[in-house]
Amino acid sequence: MSLTKVLSDALESGINQIGQLRILRDPLRLHHIDDRDLDSLELHTDPDDAREIGLYTPDGGYRFTKGELSLKTGWIFELGSVEDLRRTIDLFYPASLGLWNAWKNDQIQIQNLRDKLNRQTGMYRHARNVSDEGAQELVRCLCGPSNKCVKKILWKIDDENPLEDSEASRFNGLVGDVDESTAIPMVCQEACNFFVAQARKKSKEEFEAKDQ
Amino acid sequence: MEFTPKPNAALLIVGHGSTENPDSSTPYFDHAREIRRRNVFGEVHCCFWKEEPSMREAIYMIDADEVYVVPDFISEGYFTQDVIPRELGLTGPTTQVHGKTVHYCDPVGIHPSMTSLILQRTDEVAPGVPQEESTLFIVGHGTGLNKNSTKAIKDQVDHIKTLPNCRFADVIDTYMEEPPFIADWGKLAKTPNAVVVPFFIADGLHSYQDIPVMLGFEKEEGLAASQKEVFRRNPYHLQGKTLYYSAAIGTEPMMADVILDQISTFDAQHVAH
């Protein structure tokens, strides 16, 4: 089944939110969950505009982690089709629909952190040397709604080591106090490249600390 | 090259991206939009090494059972030969991944049609400037770590020189970090005009700051006041010559043609008909 059909069925069943996006029907519209006065919002009809909107935080910072709770307000998309809605959502939250669909159908391939780090090469190969404690600290500092990303973490450190309890490890991928039947959770099937880059830095710090 | 539409296949453009430069991924989205506009693929997606969606996530976005992957990179090298195949789970020209048939094409930068794009860019940045009185510089990073990127530029220079519509007095490959250095452009150009085209996919610190400093029209300290303005203040009068400076070649919208050409080349070489 195409993701467009999956999205269409989800909307029929009452789904109206993903991340910080509110989805309205008849006509199909998309706006920030914090915006209330829809008539005051800047109108967009081209899905490609979503990339520009999501590129910077409200104070002008580069928003390279799309799951960060820093999406600008003040805009609304009016879209002609569910296909256009899918494309717009994919620009705000890349691959989020496909990952959710794979997860709920038990087809998602989760990679634990150690497996992820162990297959890195080049300058990132040293990331594998980060300690378990260091890795757990990175999850607490980088992941979760207070930090860089509102995705639900599906992975563990390795098969024997689950994530320690923290806001990040507990987060369910839904923004705000919402009924789970009305929102699509965003999921994380493996640590991102940003996490790997930070693991490399952490492993270097740990090595230098041992050396002293 | 005429492109045969593939309404049941997906195109996945792979780019590098950046966690520091928001302009880094713009060209890839522009290339995707142009190809989408032509309606020659059932789906067109982008994915990145450093941005979202990652190569690990991208396959989940795709409905089609057949996928063409094109590395939007200027040369073969570590990324096209190691990182991309590893991240996408590719083991050869065609691999079965998550139940899909995934074709892995060569990077855009090594296709002969990049040459037409470079010449088109020179016409845009220096319109009406006699080529016979101009030297064309193609600028790369240059580094001992990656001979392939230098080779890609040298190959382009050699190819340009053979084209009947190339009337440049000279075409020279130059680099930021190895000889011939772009900083020596004034000595290398024996003509009154010089046209400089950065051989990168995206604009960033190299094209906004580093190369302009090496060319002599930007100061070293800090970022350019308005980054894109460096491309809009042509021509620059330096060292007794007139210099025309282009944005990175990857920002040319017709890069879409090179992506499609690379797919056609793949089909000609690998796909049975």
Image (cartoon, rainbow, N blue to C red):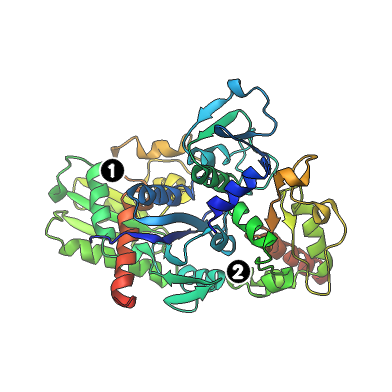
- Determine which residue is flagged by label 2: A123
Which is more toward the observer, A192 or A74? A74
Q: Residue at x 47, y 55 (%)?
A: B45
Residue B247 appears in the figure: yes
Q: Is residue B77 left or right of residue B3?
A: right
Residue B148 lies, with reference to residue B186, above or below; the image says below
Residue A28 vs residue B103, the one in the foreground:
A28
Residue denoted by label 1: B244
SS class, disc 2:
helix
Camera-side residue of A131 and A96: A96
* Residue at the (49%, 50%) spot, across then down: B25
Tell me the mark number nearer the camera, choosing from 1 and 2: 2
Looking at numbered disc 1 in the image, what kind of residue is underneath it? Tyr
Single out the residue that lies furthest toward the right.
Answer: A165
Q: Which type of secondary structure does the marked residue at label 1 adopt?
A: strand
Count every numbered label the image shows and give the total: 2
At x 74% / y 50%, what residue is drawn? A173
- The vertical placement of B186 against B155, above or below, is above
At label 2, counting other C-alpha atoms closer than 10 Å, the crowd grade (few under 14, some 14-19, many 20 or more) is few
Which percent across, then down, holds residue A105? Answer: 67, 63
Q: Residue at x 59, y 20 (%)?
A: A40
- Distance from the alpha carbon under mark 1 to that under mark 2: 36 Å
